[in-house]
Each structure stands twice: as C-alpha cells, then as structure tokens.
C-alpha cells in the first residue's frame, strides 16, 4: 500500500547507529579592524503549500539569500502558479531588492497577481502584497501590507476587504476559510525579519480545487536585515529534495535557513513520513539550526536527520549531516562538516557504506550513490549526506543537506 501524503509533529525521532565521516578546516582571514557588515535576505513567492502536497513547493520565486551586497535584487515576471492542476494565481510578478540609502539598510519584497481564483468560490483581482524591513541609526523597523482591486466571495462582492485589516479571517463556503493580509515582524538581538501574505487558503472541507487539509499561501513575501556584526552567519538544512533534470519535483523538506542566527537557541523543524510521488517514500525528517552574531564572535550550526528512505528496490537506513561555521573578531574562521548513513540494501542484498568525501557506489540498473558530498570554500561549507541518481526515473534525490558559513 502506498503511504499517504501527510505531515506529523514529532516528539522524537529514533536514529540507528551510523558510520560517521567528518572533515574540519580552520582558516585565518580578514583583520581585527575589518568594518562591520549588514546582512540582507528575502523572498517573494507566487504560492507556497503549507501542508500536504509535498510535490508543490514555492512557485514564481524571487529570492536573495544572505548577502552583504546592498544592491542585490531578484525578480520573476509573467507566470502562472498552479496547485493541484488548478491555476490559482495568474500573471504573477515577484521581486526582492536590498537597499542602502536615506531610508537606512534594508530589504523590500513584493508580489502581485492579476487575479487569484478558486472557480466560483473565490475571486481576488489586482492583488499586491509587500513587506520591508530596515535598520537605521540602530533602530529596527518594518512595514507590510496587502491590497486588492476586487474581492468576491461566491457571487458576492465585498468592497470592505479591498484593504483588509491585518490577519482578517473570512469564511468561504465550499472551501473552508481564508486569511487576508497576513502580516507581521519579529525583532531579535541581531536584526529583524518581516513577512506578508496576500491570502492564505485553508481547505477544511472536500472540494474540487484543493485537497482537504491543505493550506496554501498566495503572494508570500519576506524581508530580513541584520544589524552590523563581526560577521553575518549563513546556511541552511533540509531532509530531502528531488528533481528531474533541472525541474524540482519535491522541494526541500523540513527546510531551515538563516541570515542572523537564533540568538543561541536551537530551532527544530520536523515532518512525519511522506511520499514523493513516483519517486520515493521518506521516513520522519527533522532539521536543527543554532547560531548567534556578536561583537566578539559569530557562529552557526545546522543539522539534518532522516529516519530512512526507500526508492524503488533501494532501501537506506538513517541518514544524518551537520555543518558549522564561526568567525572571531581577530579574523579567525572555522568550518566543520560531518555526515553518516546507516545502511544500504537492495532487496535482501546489503551494500557497504562508502566513507571519505564524495565517495561513490554504483548499483547496476538501480542507482548511483554519492556519499558525503562536500563543497568547501574559504568561509562556507556544504554537505549532502547522500545523493541518489535514480537511473530509471532520471531523477536525483538529495538526502541530508546541511550548510554553514560566515560573511564579513
């Protein structure tokens, strides 16, 4: 029986004993007198599925990820966002831009759509959402808003919702409910991030457009900026990601990233077992991140944990990876990575787990496995615990990704 698509909260995930591989590098770079840096990060999505439908990741993406370049920008225009074979949002445009000017240092992310429709249940026209986060003279600030040219629930126009108050909840017969103009901002000791979403669709009843129990954010934006520090910390982690050629068929699971650390607290994101349609069954997944930015030292740690994965006849035991980076005010930089895979089986035959960086195992007619795939740069390190090239599906599955680095 094929496992159902679903997500579960995890209290704990059991991990079998594994064979470990580790690599470490320490560098000396920069100087004690180096100028503090600002960090810029943000994105704008056309749509983003929150639960279920693991094969529907963010669409129509504009993104800048953890950079010190105040002129960074990204845009994506004239596209349709499809969910469950439905054209949810049409003529979508997204953009994300960093800036350093009279406003201060910050990021603005914007997403627009000519219309957002669910058949005869909902019609939102002329939708625009934007959010900005910035720091000026040491003060952290943000704004976020959404506007519509027209709002129709069923056959009824609702002019009062053209400029909906933040987080306005509205019942939609035949679907469940929606939340309009979902906005907010979070200040930390090292920076600020803000978010805005034009509408979040909550399917609480059976309908022809979205599977029951699924939540979809449409026109989703985020802007993030850090205060000046010794260094900006960067990195990310996820459990699995699958693609056919350059087409992503399953976005990162339990994904976490950072541009300003976590003030030394451990953040954990977990999902239960899930199915990547026509590709793989994945056991429980969780990731962790922890980091901080300070005047004397900046550091970040990421880890990824997958209980196991099955791809056709290929069965793989628990998979883990970790990456860390740090920099001190005297310019010293350290990078570490590690990864492990518990076991490899095809039917009743067991295969050895290769050790060392970028080690490969060919299983004729089944797949090529690459273990401990490491990319190391002067101030950044990335590790994929396992990369599976599935011959019959022309598909690549990355399992257990962690990365960490410092900028500045």
Image: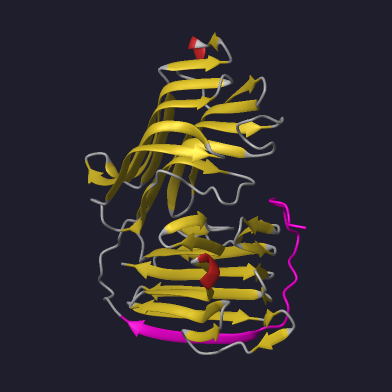
Queried whether the magenta region covers residue 352, the answer comes back as no
Query: Against 160, is 230 above or below?
Result: below
Query: Against 246, is 309 above or below?
Result: below
Q: Position of residue 304 (x, y in %)?
A: 59, 68
Query: Which quadrant would the N terminus be assigned to in this image?
Result: bottom right
Left or right of 374: which side holds 363? Answer: right
Residue visible at 54% across and 85% down in the picture: 361
Q: Quadrant of residue 113?
A: top left
Query: Which quadrant would the C terminus be assigned to in this image?
Result: bottom left
Near-viewer residue (31 or 383)? 383
Query: Against 208, is 171 above or below?
Result: above
Left or right of 294: which side holds 237? Answer: right
Near-viewer residue (36 or 112)? 112
- Does the image show residue 357? yes
- Does the image show residue 398? no
Residue visible at 67% across and 69% down in the picture: 310
Q: What span is colored magenta in the figure?
A: 1-28
Near-viewer residue (262 or 70)? 70
Queried whether the magenta region covers residue 20, the answer comes back as yes
Query: Against 364, is 10 above or below?
Result: above
Q: Identify the coloring.
A: secondary structure
Q: Position of residue 315 (x, y in %)?
A: 68, 75
Q: Position of residue 363 (x, y in %)?
A: 57, 83
Residue visible at 54% across and 81% down in the picture: 338
Counting labels gives 0
Left or right of 228: which side holds 89? Answer: right
Q: Position of residue 18 (x, y in %)?
A: 67, 83
Could you tell me what secondary structure mostly forms the magenta stretch? loop
Q: Quadrant of residue 104?
A: top left
Near-viewer residue (354 or 165)? 354
């Amino acid at each position: 029986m094929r496992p159902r698509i679903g997500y579960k909260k995890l209290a704990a995930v059991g991990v079998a004993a594994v064979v470990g591989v580790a690599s470490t590098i320490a560098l000396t770079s920069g100087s004690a007198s180096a100028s503090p840096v600002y960090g810029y990060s943000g994105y704008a999505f056309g749509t983003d599925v929150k639960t279920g439908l693991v094969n529907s990741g963010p669409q129509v993406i504009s993104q800048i990820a953890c950079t010190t370049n105040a002129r960074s920008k990204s845009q994506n225009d004239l596209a349709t966002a499809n969910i469950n074979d439905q054209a949810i949002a049409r003529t979508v445009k997204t953009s994300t831009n960093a800036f350093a000017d009279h406003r201060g240092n910050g990021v603005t992310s914007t997403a627009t759509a000519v219309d957002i429709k669910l058949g005869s249940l909902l019609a939102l026209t002329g939708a625009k959402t934007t959010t900005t986060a910035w720091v000026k003279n040491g003060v952290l600030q943000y704004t976020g808003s959404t506007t519509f040219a027209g709002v129709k629930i069923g056959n009824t126009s609702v002019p009062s919702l053209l400029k909906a108050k933040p987080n306005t909840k509205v019942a939609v017969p035949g679907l469940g409910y929606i939340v309009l103009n979902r906005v907010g901002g979070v200040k930390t000791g090292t920076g600020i991030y803000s978010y805005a979403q034009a509408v979040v669709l909550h399917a609480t009843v059976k309908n022809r457009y979205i599977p029951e129990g699924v939540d979809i954010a449409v026109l989703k934006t985020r802007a993030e900026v850090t205060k000046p520090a010794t260094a900006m910390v960067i990195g990310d982690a996820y459990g699995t990601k699958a693609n056919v050629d350059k087409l992503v068929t399953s976005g990162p699971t339990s994904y976490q990233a950072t541009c300003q650390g976590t003030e030394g607290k451990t953040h954990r994101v977990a999902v239960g077992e899930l199915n990547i349609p026509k590709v793989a069954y994945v056991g429980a997944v969780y990731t962790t991140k922890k980091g901080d930015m300070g005047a004397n030292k900046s550091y970040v740690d990421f880890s990824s944990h997958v209980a196991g994965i099955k791809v056709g006849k290929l069965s793989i035991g628990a998979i883990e990876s970790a990456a860390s980076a740090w920099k001190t005010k005297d310019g010293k930089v350290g990078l570490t990575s590690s990864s492990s895979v518990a076991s490899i089986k095809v039917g009743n035959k067991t295969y050895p787990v290769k050790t060392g960086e970028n080690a490969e195992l060919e299983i004729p007619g089944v797949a090529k496995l690459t273990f401990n795939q490491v990319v190391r740069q002067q101030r950044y390190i990335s590790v994929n615990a396992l990369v599976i090239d599935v011959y019959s599906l022309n598909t690549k599955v990355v399992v257990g990704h962690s990365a960490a680095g410092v900028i500045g």
